[in-house]
Image (tube, helix red, strand yellow):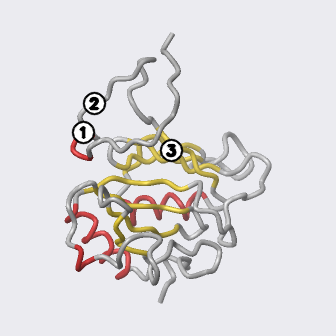
């Protein structure tokens, strides 16, 4: 059994972030994340068209209404599968009025990828908070939302030009993403 250590503040060197994939219990990484979707087709389209997802496993779309399995789409984004599925109880618990920063799903990219994605998202009419520097300067992130209110992040651990950021998270005049206020929400793909 692995020794349980006391948690203490730490900050591993950012260049070491992706050097290891070992784990005391042979867990190799994240396989998939499942997000509840009121409209599975809309969210699958969003993941494909906005996040570059590729269909990996899709069920329930080719059947007669009321038959078989509920619609589900597993879409590959990088090396993680994004599962879009309806809530079993039919109640969507993710919403545009939720002020909490979590849960949120973060995608890693390069510094150039962060800049390009921010520009691309804005060109699609999707509001973006950032890019902003995390305290300590070890990473830079931008936050945005899905059409249903899922909170998303794009992060880089590479150096990012300070003049292309909105500043440091939490600093006066910068603050944090204002979830629940409507500032980051949109009606993609009908943004205008």
The residue identified by callout 2 is: 20
* 178, 69: nearer the viewer: 178
Depicted 137 relative to depicted 176: above or below: above
SS assignment at label 2: loop
Q: Between 68 and 50, which is closer to the camera in this rendering?
A: 50
Label at residue 33: none
Q: Residues within 10 Å of mark 3 (few under 14, many from 20)?
A: some
Residue 58, disc: 3
Query: What SS does tag 1 mark?
Result: helix
Identify the image quadrant of residue 27: top left
Q: Where is residue 117 in the image (x, y as percent from the top left)?
A: 30, 69
Using the numbered discs, state the Cα–Cα distance from disc 3 to disc 2 in whole angstroms.
Answer: 31 Å
Mark 1 or 2, which is nearer the eye?
A: 1
Please state if 9 lies on the left or on the right of 162 as rendered.
right
The residue to which callout 1 is attached is 16
Q: Nearer the viewer, mark 1 or mark 3?
A: 1
On screen, residue 108 above or below 164: above
CB under 8 Å between discs 1 and 2: yes
Mark 1 or mark 3, which has the lower sequence index?
A: 1
């Amino acid at each position: 059994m692995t020794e349980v250590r006391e948690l203490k503040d730490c900050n591993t060197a950012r260049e070491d972030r992706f050097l290891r994939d070992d784990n005391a219990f042979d867990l190799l990484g994240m396989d998939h994340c499942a997000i509840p979707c009121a409209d599975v087709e809309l969210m699958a389209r969003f993941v494909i068209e906005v996040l570059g997802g590729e269909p990996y496993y899709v069920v329930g779309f080719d059947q007669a209404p009321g038959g078989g399995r509920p619609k589900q789409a597993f879409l590959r984004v990088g090396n993680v599968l994004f599962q879009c599925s309806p809530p079993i109880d039919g109640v969507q618990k993710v919403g545009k009025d939720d002020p909490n920063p979590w849960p949120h799903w973060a995608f890693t990219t390069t510094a150039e990828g962060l800049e390009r994605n921010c520009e691309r998202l804005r060109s699609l009419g999707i509001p973006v908070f950032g890019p902003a520097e995390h305290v300590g300067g070890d990473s830079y992130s931008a936050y945005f939302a899905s059409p249903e209110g899922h909170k998303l992040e794009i992060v880089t651990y590479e150096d990012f030009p300070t003049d292309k950021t909105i500043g440091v998270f939490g600093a006066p005049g910068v603050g944090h993403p204002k979830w629940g206020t409507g500032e980051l929400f949109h009606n993609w793909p009908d943004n205008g």
